[in-house]
Amino acid sequence: MLKIAKTEISKLKRYSVIWIGVATMLTVVLLTRFMATASDGAVHTLENFSDSVIWNNFSLIFPATITMIAGYIIERERVDDTLKNILAIPITFRKLLAGKLIAVGGLAVLLAVIEFVFTMSVFFISRFPGFSFTGMMTALFKMIGMNLFVYVAVLPIIIFTGQRAGSFMAGVGFSFFYGFIGTFASGHGLGSIYPITVGLSLINYQNGETTACNKVLSTGILFLMFAISNAMVLFSKNKVPSAKANKKPAKNKRKN
C-alpha cells in the first residue's frame, strides 16, 4: 500500500491540475486581503487574518479543489487507458484507489503549507500588526489541520465518484455546495456535527469570537467519516459503462 502511495506521489508532478490547487490557495489569500481592505476601521493581526484565510478556504475553495484534484488523478488512469494494464499486474482497484487517496492526503498538507507561505507573504506586504513566531507556527498547524479535516470530510464523495467513469465533476459540484453550506451550519450551532466544519473546533478556531464547540463530538464525527471512507474503499469497484450499453445499434440494411 505504501509503495503504491509513494508511486502516486511521484506521479503528481506530471499533472498540471496541481497548479490549479496552488492557484486556488493564492486566490483565497488575495480574496481575504481584499475583504480586509474593505472592512473599515478593523485591525488585522496575524491571528485574525490567518483565521479569515482558513474560513474562506474551507467554505469557498478547498472542498471542491481537493475533490477535483483527487477525481482527476483517479480518472486519468481511465483516460490514458492505463488502468486495465495496472490492474493486470495484479493490483486490485481498491489498493490502487487507497494509494491515490493517501497521495492526495499528502497533497492536502502541501497545499496548506503553500497557503501558509502566501498568507505570510501578504501579511508582511500589508504590514499588518501582531506578528510573533508562536502565532506564525500556530497559523501553520491550523491550516494543515483544517485541510486534513476537510479532506476526510469529502473522502466519501471522492471515493463514490472515483469508482464511476466520468463522474468526478459531479463530485466537485457537490463538494462546493457541501463546503458553502458549512458557513450556515457553523452559524447555527451545528459546527460540531457538520463534517466540513468539525475541524474548526479541533483547531481552536476563534477569529476574535468565543464560539461553543464540542471537541468530543467533533472528533467522533471525524472518525465516523473516516470509518465510512474505509468501508467504501474496502468494497470499491471500478464501475465502467458496460460494453452492451455503449454498443451502437446496428443500422438497418437497405432493402433492394
Image: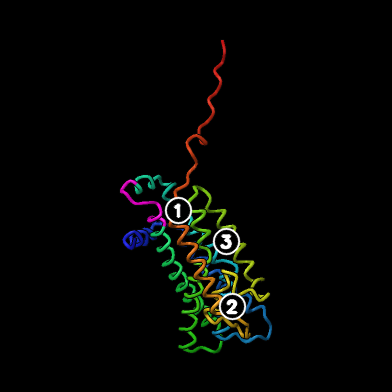
Labelled disc at residue 52: 2
Which residue was labeled with disc 3?
175
SS type, badge 2: helix
Front residue (pair 37, 165): 165
Which residue was labeled with disc 1?
236
Q: Amino acid at mark 2?
A: Ser
Q: Which region of the structure is painted magenta?
A: 88-97
Q: Amino acid at mark 3?
A: Ser
- For the residues marked 2 and 3, what is the alpha-carbon distance in whole angstroms? 20 Å
Few, some or many residues within 10 Å of mark 3 (<14, 14–19, 20+): many
Residue 6 placed where, x, y %? 33, 62
Residue 134 included in the magenta stretch of the image: no
- For the residues marked 1 and 2, what is the alpha-carbon distance in whole angstroms? 37 Å
Residue 139 placed where, x, y %? 50, 81
Q: Earlier in the sequence, mark 1 or mark 3?
A: 3
Front residue (pair 52, 173): 173
Which residue is at a point 50% across and 58% down the rendered structure image? Answer: 158
